[in-house]
Each structure stands twice: as C-alpha cells, then as structure tokens.
Amino acid sequence: MATRQSGPIGRPRGFDAEEALERAMLFFWEHGYEGASLAGLTEAMGISTTSMYAAFGNKEELFRKALDRYTEGPSAYLARALEEPTALGVAAAVLAGTVRTTTRPAHPHGCLGVQGALATGDSGQAVRDLLAAWRTNGCSQLRDRFQQAVDDGELPPEADPGLLARYVTTLAFGIAVQAASGIGRDDLQEMADAALRSWPLA
C-alpha cells in the first residue's frame, strides 16, 4: 500500500523579506511614520497585511527594522566617516555623506532619522523617542571621536568635543531638512564647505 508523503510544515513565505523591508524603508522615508498607512505600506511591499504582521510584526516593529536597514545602508556613511584620520576629515565626510544621501535622485529626499516622526500623535511617541535616541547616538559617536582627536593633539586642547559634535550633527540635520525642501546637492555642499571653514585646528 502506498504511503502518503507529508508536505512541508507551514506555508512558504512566498516573498523576498529583504526586498519587502527595503521597500518599507523607502516608504517610511518618503511618508514618515504616521503618514505611512498600513494599506500604503503593504502595497509598496507587495505583500498582504497578514504576511506583514507574520514576517515583521506590527507597524512600529516594522519601522524599527526599517530604521536598522537605513542605518546599515543609506546612513552607513557615518560609520565610514568616523574612520577618517582627522577630525576635520570626519566632519567633512559626515556632511558630504548627508548631502549625497539626502539628494539621491532614486531615493526620497531628506533623512528618515530626521523627518520620520516630526509630526505624530500620542501613538507615535515610541517612534519619536526611538528617532531621538538614534540622533543622539550619532552625536555621541562624533563626540567620542572628537575627544580622541583632542587627546591625540590633533584638535587644540581647548576644543569642546561635545560642542563640535552638536555643531556637525545640527548642520547635517539642517542639510536633510533643506534637501527635503528641494534644495539642490551643489548648494547644500557649498553650505557644508562654508560651515567647516571655521573648524578649529591645533
């Protein structure tokens, strides 16, 4: 008597999770957290709401995963900039990276980490807090790098690493907002170059 073969346990996912997450990141980047409806997200991702919840969790969890992808992808210029041999090189690389990332023709303009939750209701408080922590973490990494430059004598001893870090991050966030408003890449880079002409040197 023939035996019946058992099929695979569970249904195959049927979609590329990495590709779906990439599309979700771009959708959040363009519309912000609150502006990204579930219907819009799932349509952009090419999956059903049921599949989205099964693969990524709820909207907030999906956003957290999208922000991680943004950090490791479009925003990875920060990690590369920290490896520059001089503090001025770090600052210049951060601003140049911001200009490039926020003005790419094939991507939404602006920065997911800056504009992602500028206007949200009470339900978006956790996402606002998440993005505030994301921005603070970037500033802290710069502060530590500039402290190293002071310790190494590459920045003058009176330089304030925390102030310099806030200066660079404020410039970067301003660039992102300007880019989202339609200011062009050349104009933004010119502004970044001008802002670094007063950089302290040992």
Image: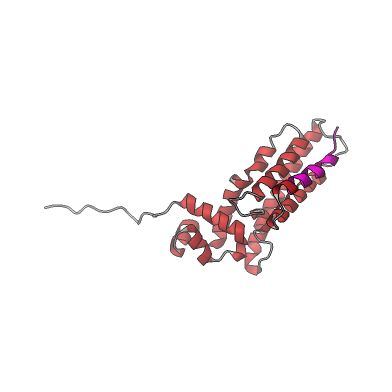
Residue at point 75%, 36% (across, down): 89
Residue 18 x/y as whole percent? 48, 50
- From this view, report whether residue 101 is shown above or below residue 34: above
Q: Nearer the viewer, residue 110 or 49?
A: 110
* In the displayed structure image, the side of residue 1 where residue 107 appears, left or right: right
Residue at point 84%, 42% (across, down): 160
* Residue bounds of the magenta highlight: 188-202
Residue 60 x/y as whole percent? 57, 61
Residue 120 x/y as whole percent? 66, 66
Residue 194 occupies quadrant = top right
In this view, the residue farthest toward the right is 158
Residue 180 among magenta residues: no
Residue 80 x/y as whole percent? 66, 38
- From this view, report whether residue 143 is shown above or below residue 49: above
Quarter placement of the C terminus: top right
* In the displayed structure image, the side of residue 157 where residue 135 appears, left or right: left
- From this view, report whether residue 34 is shown above or below residue 182: below
**By what rule are the colours in the image chosen?**
secondary structure
Q: Nearer the viewer, residue 89 or 69?
A: 89
Q: Nearer the viewer, residue 72 or 30?
A: 30
Q: Which SS does the magenta portion mostly show?
A: helix
Residue 114 occupies quadrant = bottom right
Residue at point 63%, 60% (across, down): 127
Residue 193 among magenta residues: yes
In this view, the residue farthest toward the left is 1
